[in-house]
Image (cartoon, rainbow, N blue to C red):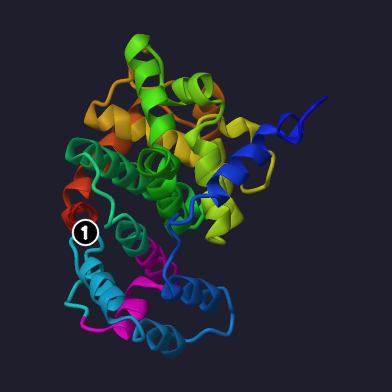
Amino acid sequence: MISEQQTINPEEKLRRKLSSITNLPSPPLVFNQITKIINNPRTSVRDVAAIMSEDAAMSAKVLRLSNSAFYGARSEITGIRQAVLVLGLEAIKSLVLSSSVFDMFKSHKLDPEFQESYWRHSLSTAIAARIVAQYHRVARGLDAEVAFSAGLLHDIGKLITCCFLPDEHKLITEYRASRPSSDYQAEMAAVGHAHTQIGRMLAANWKLPVAIQRAIEFHHFPMQDEEESRVYSIIIHFANYLAKRTFGTKVPQYEGWIDLLPEVHADLELTDEVIEAFCSKLREEYAASSTFMQLAMAS
């Protein structure tokens, strides 16, 4: 007799597994309110400032990030209203998301080396995604802040596994120690699902834009994304490559960093000169992002 468990597809099994985690992170109320209000075309700067004022700690962090060298404001930003006017609504939303994500993992005592490596790669990928999106913004109608958020969260499934699925994390770690493999390959072989699936489900639970959800899910295989927003999956794939290439994080089974798919190379019209220019720009902007890392490591 076939049990119910045997008839459940892998996607549903993973969904149930995540739903059983009682303390799975969820964004603070202010994030959901900000997302909702920014998506309203009638939203005013006053509306955003009013919502932000309800969370003094979040407002302080957003102002700190707004004044960081990363955003390069010409003069000091002293209030949320001014931050919205100077940086724009989408930038404020990505800053609120960044602060929220850092806060969500404060209570988890992560291995310091893993934590630093994780956030450095996530942030460098986010910055790379923002740079590439800005480069193609006019021709392809892209939002650089959507790309930044997708880059910041592209590996969030790894953090969830480390914090909430310790048995699976151990199996994956043991698999990688026993043979050369990427994280994705080890996850699929050891536990039957990857960080990309976990990340997409989490992003869906947080009601993030579909473009971000799909970029998280398809950043290893962007050409499998059949939605119109596939360009963000393509950009995160390339940004992931740029981050590893620029900062020297090599994957054992490859001679280089990760595979850059030929289709992505063609889609983004890349040349060796263009790639090197992106790497140079990434090094420059990452050097100005220390405030982000300070907030992340404070968690």
In the image, 41: left or right of 122?
Answer: right
Which secondary structure, mark 1?
helix
Tell me what residue is drawn at x 38 percent, y 36 percent. Answer: 166
Q: State left or right for residue 185 relative to residue 81.
A: right
The x, y position of residue 292, in whole percent, is 23, 56
Badge 1 is on which residue?
295
The magenta region covers 78-97
Residue drawn at 80 percent across, 26 percent down: 2
User: Of residues 210 and 278, which is closer to you in this image?
Assistant: 210
In the depicted structure, whether residue 87 falls above or below residue 197: below
Q: What percent of the width, then of the height, locates residue 55?
A: 33, 81
Counting from the top left corner in percent of width and height, residue 176 is at: 37, 17
Q: Residue at x 61, y 31 (%)?
A: 223
Q: Is residue 140 visible?
A: no
Residue at the spot 49% in from the left edge and 21% down from the top edge: 190
Q: Quadrant of residue 259?
A: top left
Quadrant (top left/top right/bottom left/bottom right) for the N terminus = top right
Asked if the stretch drawn in magenta spans residue 88, the answer is yes
Which of the pair 140/119 is nearer the observer? 119
| Vertical arrangement, residue 86 with respect to residue 230, above or below | below
In magenta stretch: residue 64: no
